[in-house]
Amino acid sequence: MFRIRTYNQISVRGLERFPRDRYEVASEIGTADALLLRSHKLQVEQLDASVRAVARAGAGVNNIPVQACTDRGIAVFNTPGANANAVKELVAAGMLLASRGIVEGIGYVSGLPASMDASEMNKQLEAEKKRFAGNELHGKTLGVIGLGAIGSLVARLGLDLGMEVIGYDPALSVEAAWRLPSEVRRMENIGALFARADFVSLHLPVLDSTRNLIGSETLAQARKGACLLNFAREEIVEIDALLAALGRGQLRCYVADFPHPRLVGRPDCLLMPHIGASTEEAEENCAVMAADQLRAFLEHGNIRNAVNFPTLELERTGGCRIAVANRNVPGMLGHILSIFAEARINVVDMLNKSRENIAYNLIDVEGEPSAAVIDAISRVDGVINVRLIPAPR
């Protein structure tokens, strides 16, 4: 029986992915095999010795102590792409709101007296509507920075709206490149993208390399009157530089899902309360993906979409499987295999991969190793943890 401790309200569709005869899932579980959460700020003290995995139903993991998890051999999963469509649609809304006088027009109409005569109202609206005239998106240039699951959808959205789309991503993966429409022109650097784009949409994670990435030097290269959209993370945009760019008219508008006290109330800022992924569909998709990834890991040791472990999936060949997490240093695999050899245990299949300072091994063997064998592996210098996974049911 696997035990999953939940934090926050997890979509029922996700919770239903755990078979009741093999899983106990609740918010009050003392000894948990895995943790499932959304926005809960996980503390190191909540990482019990029994925990082997943490899954976040969402893309960002800034609320999880990833390094502490890695040090303990705990895999941390996220759900990239599960909320991508929800964010893409809000980006579309953001561009439209920034282009047309929609917000101002609604505010004007809302301020009209309810007692006003209908014919008089129509006459007044016809006279005043020119105040809210805007521009179409068709024919404008959209620059997308970060061409992953969300960025590629935003790029396709721009093309569907008749925009010219340019993109920049220094770490574009092969998988992301396949998703990207061929009509998107790839730029060599951020400055060149800002110089050409009428709209710039950010879709980057917060890393040391991206924190305050959009600063004074970058914004100085922006096309005069451009609109910057940030539905990624607040920390990517440097606030002082943003205010300066808005003040001199270098940027016409800033649309963001991350309000900042210094931006609230400005007519050139459209701020939303972090609702990019706040749709029923996105929450369900994230919960289902997170649950499926936990099941694959707990039942088979397979890893997909971990932010701190290598991607590794090995088909079951029957028999027992041993999952070993260890420091990524020379000779580790040889030490582990020698223990099986000394115990006369036949290895029928295996896979080993590493990621930065950690390595992960899946080893299928004939029969079931004794507790002494598992203990011997766990005592190898450099091994972080060992898990015996029974034959699949």
Image (spheres, rainbow, N blue to C red):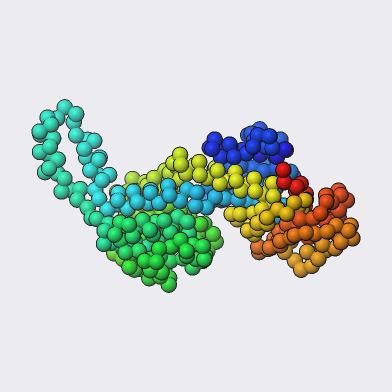
Left-right relation of 8 to 267: right
Q: Nearer the viewer, residue 141 or 176?
A: 176
Q: Nearer the viewer, residue 7 or 296?
A: 296
Q: Is residue 8 above or below residue 193?
A: above
Q: Nearer the viewer, residue 218 or 9?
A: 9
Q: Position of residue 22 (x, y in %)?
A: 69, 37
Left-right relation of 74 to 192: right
Q: Quadrant of the C terminus?
A: top right
Q: Position of residue 66 (x, y in %)?
A: 63, 52
Query: From this viewpoint, which residue is outermost toward the bottom?
Result: 188
Q: Position of residue 100 (x, y in %)?
A: 25, 50
Q: State the residue at coordinates (24%, 48%).
A: 101
Left-right relation of 360 to 65: right
Res. 278 image quadrant: top left
Query: From this viewpoint, which residue is outermost toward the top?
Result: 115
Q: State the residue at coordinates (47%, 64%).
A: 178
Q: State the residue at coordinates (47%, 48%).
A: 83
Q: Is residue 225 above or below residue 388?
A: below
Left-right relation of 371 to 302: right
Q: Position of residue 24 (x, y in %)?
A: 67, 35
Q: State the residue at coordinates (71%, 62%).
A: 352
Residue 326 visible at all = no
Q: Quadrant of the N terminus?
A: top right
Q: Is residue 198 above or below residue 125?
A: below
